[in-house]
Image: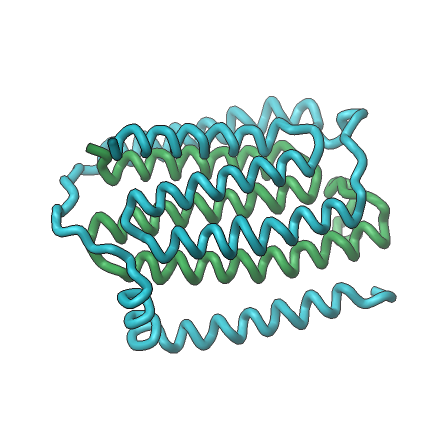
Amino acid sequence: MVATHHYLFLAAALFTIGVIGVLTRRNIMIVLMSIELMMNAVNINLIAFSNHLQQVNGQIFAIFVITVAAAEAAVGLGIVIAMFKNKETMNINEIDLMKW
Amino acid sequence: MIEILFFFFAALAVGAAINVLVQKHVLYSALSLIVLLSSMSGLFILLRADFLAVIQVIVYAGAIMVLFVFVIMLLNLPEDEDGADRLRWLKFLGIPLGLFFLFLTVITLWNVERQDIVEAQMAGTPELIGRSLFTDYLLPFEATSLLILIALMGAVVFAKKDL
């Protein structure tokens, strides 16, 4: 029997892989994709608890997370394109305009 | 049967997630992320969240990932050959810290008292979700439309020629 905590462990593993991606890779596309991965791990948690408690609220929240992820992807990729046009790089270490 | 499907989809998801990080070319990472999102939709079906499984495929694996792949192909990114993408010391710092985070999470989850799932299965049908979305969660739903409008305007501003 697959219990709720199996899903929680899976979500923790996926979230950790997303965190490692944000921490180690310097390509801005990979960083954006890792953030999407982390949002998906949160979605698994929400839906697992929705199933565990037999309430639909968790799935509603997952829908909101997906909507926010879509908005984030649209704006994030717009930023990527504007950045690439101005600086010709995808490395986030070279984007240091706001760095003191 | 459900156990086999769960471990199949879970292994596929974790493998694809690791593949996203180790691939050299960004396009292969994006394709691997599509595999991850599709396997996650299978997990949603196992959790009786039918509507969200469909939404996951249409919105995530469809719309969002098409946007990613489109941008990667539009910019025609070169393969990361000189390894400037991965700094050496970042790998030795990031991976242990990430695994430490996983360790803390697993320890916390391990100590939580476990309950068995209630057998009365509730399926996340469109009817149930729509009823809840248009009654209890009507205000957040409307706020979401405002959020999408703002994201739309932001994307248009970023696409302007002289930014």
Q: Is residue B90 above or below residue A15?
A: above
Residue name at image x 49 percent, y 62 percent: A67
Would you identify the image quadrant in which residue B116 lies?
top left
Would you identify the image quadrant in which residue A77 lies?
bottom right
Q: Nearer the viewer, residue A87 or B18?
A: B18
Q: Is residue B126 visible?
A: yes
Would you identify the image quadrant in which residue B159 lies?
bottom right
- The chain whose colour is green is A
Image spot of residue B94 (x, y percent)? 57, 29
Residue name at image x 32 percent, y 33 percent: B5
Q: Is residue A96 visible?
A: no
Q: Nearer the viewer, residue B125 or A69?
A: B125
Residue name at image x 79 percent, y 26 percent: B81
Image spot of residue B59 (x, y percent)? 51, 56
Q: Quadrant of the C terminus of chain B?
A: bottom right
Q: Nearer the viewer, residue A76 or B44?
A: B44
Image spot of residue B36 (x, y percent)? 49, 38
- The chain whose colour is cyan is B
Image spot of residue B125 (x, y percent)? 29, 60
Q: Nearer the viewer, residue A23 or B123?
A: B123
Q: Total of numbered circles in the picture?
A: 0
